[in-house]
Amino acid sequence: MTRLPRFAVVDYGAGNLVSIDQALSRVGADVVVARDPAGLTGAAALVVPGVGAAAPAMDRLRAAGLVEPIRNWIAAGRPYLGICLGLQLLFDGSDEDGAETLGVVPGRTTRLVDAPTLPHIGWNQVERTRDHDLFDGIAPDADFYFVHSYAGAAQDEAAVLARTTHGSSFVSAVARDNVLGVQFHPERSGADGLRLLANVVELVGSGALAASAAGSAAAPVSAAR
Amino acid sequence: MLRRRVIPCLDVANGRVVKGTRFVDLVDEGDPPELAERYAAEGADELVFLDISAAPEGRGTLLDIVERTARRAFIPLTVGGGVRSVDDMRDVLRAGADKVSLNTAAVADPELIRACAGRFGRQAVVVAIDARRLTTDKAGWEVVVKGGREATELEAVAWAERAVALGAGELLVTSMDRDGTRSGFDTELLRAIADRVEVPVIASGGAAGPADFVAAVREGQADAVLAASIFHRRIHSIGAVKQAMAAAGLPVRLVPEAAA
């Protein structure tokens, strides 16, 4: 039996990890909760969840000594999955409170404009702008569960994987090299959400995410396998 | 486009799902995790889980049941009943809830809403309002607390606005007059509140059939519709309700019925 890929779910006090732990375990990941840099040891992938505002989240990540390790993790081309706030943190900064965030994907997190209700709570359609294995086996018009008032406005459309409309259109999924991010909550999106997480586990387990990282630098590694 | 949600409600007393009429005459309806899994498979968009047992020792039971329920249903779970502090909320979220519903405790101490939203984000804070139509010559609705046992001085629409200003991310509005009566939602109450707040409003109390769900959204301007007994007793399936909503032109999430 092959070893299950280990997913470190970062706990920085920004949300409920139970459902993410349960969902990832259900689709074949070995889940560990990481509260400090040592918690990342031995992990094949990093999951950053979270809800709420960016500034307190960055403060808590900093207090846990996790900001630099997460930056280094991403820079090293290792698999990262951001969920909700974990996606927003990938951008340069947030208009919610002026927080500077990780700056991995060019763009900012802005308040949803023209939204009929705020927060945007409930199931909404995730319209894909290009193909990616993240959505393998999931119907093109599938709905996922959202809970947020702010979302990413990407400057680099190449990083955008899907958009969703609530009043106006916002970025609901990104993929760039080893980095994946979703604004919705796959762990609470029923069968389609579990399938998406299973796809992530598959991508991590097969080395596909890490191998595509850092462009040509990673090519010899994948060729050697 | 954002879908209108259909939400089965599990009223839990002493570890079992129960349902009454106008908050009394409780009848046993089943095991919470079992019902939760069934509803998730049938296309429920969320679950609301309300601990209505007055017994203080119910707390431990509740957390255990929340955990067992969260493990079996991969859809959002809101838990309410007896949450009186930020620490209570933390415990319920740790057990696997995504949101917490505040009712009596928020009326007693409105600052609790602000404290909970400040700690966990407003999206995790649902304020539940039980409202009863004023029978005197005054128009409007009064807020009732303690499971319908105690009237307050609060007017429901004003309280709804204040709750949102304090940090409620959603409002769960129950018409006590209609609860369990299967006589339709109080769409005037819903509309009065939805017109005044930006956050989603969940309609509750009075569902009899699919037409009531359509009315709650159309006339009541509700974003989500909650019901209990019609689903527990299999009078209507979640799928049938959603089909009717879709036929009426409302955006809903249709899922293929799982083989039972």
Image (spheres, grey):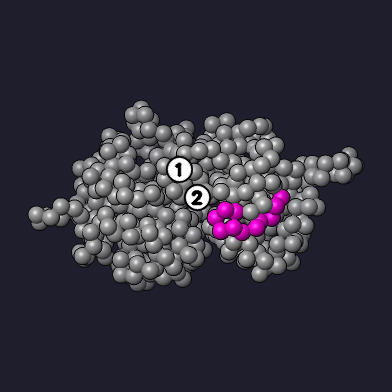
Q: Position of residue A98 (x, y in %)?
A: 59, 58
Q: Main secondary structure of the magenta part?
A: loop
Q: Is residue A44 above or below residue B231?
A: below
- Residue B92: x, y in percent? 46, 63
What residue does disc 1 label?
A115
Picture quadrant where residue A219 is located:
top right
Residue A225 lies in quadrant: top right
The CA distance from mark 2 to mark 1 is 9 Å
Please count the marks in the image. 2
Q: Is residue A46 visible?
A: yes
The stretch of residues the image draws in magenta is A94-104
Please indicate whether residue B94 sits to the left or right of residue B102 in the image.
right
Q: Amino acid at mark 2?
A: Ser
Looking at the image, which residue is at 31% across and 50% down?
B196
Question: Can residue B30 be seen in the rendering of this structure?
Answer: no
Disc 1 marks a residue whose amino acid type is: Ala
Decide if residue B190 is on the left or right side of residue A195. left
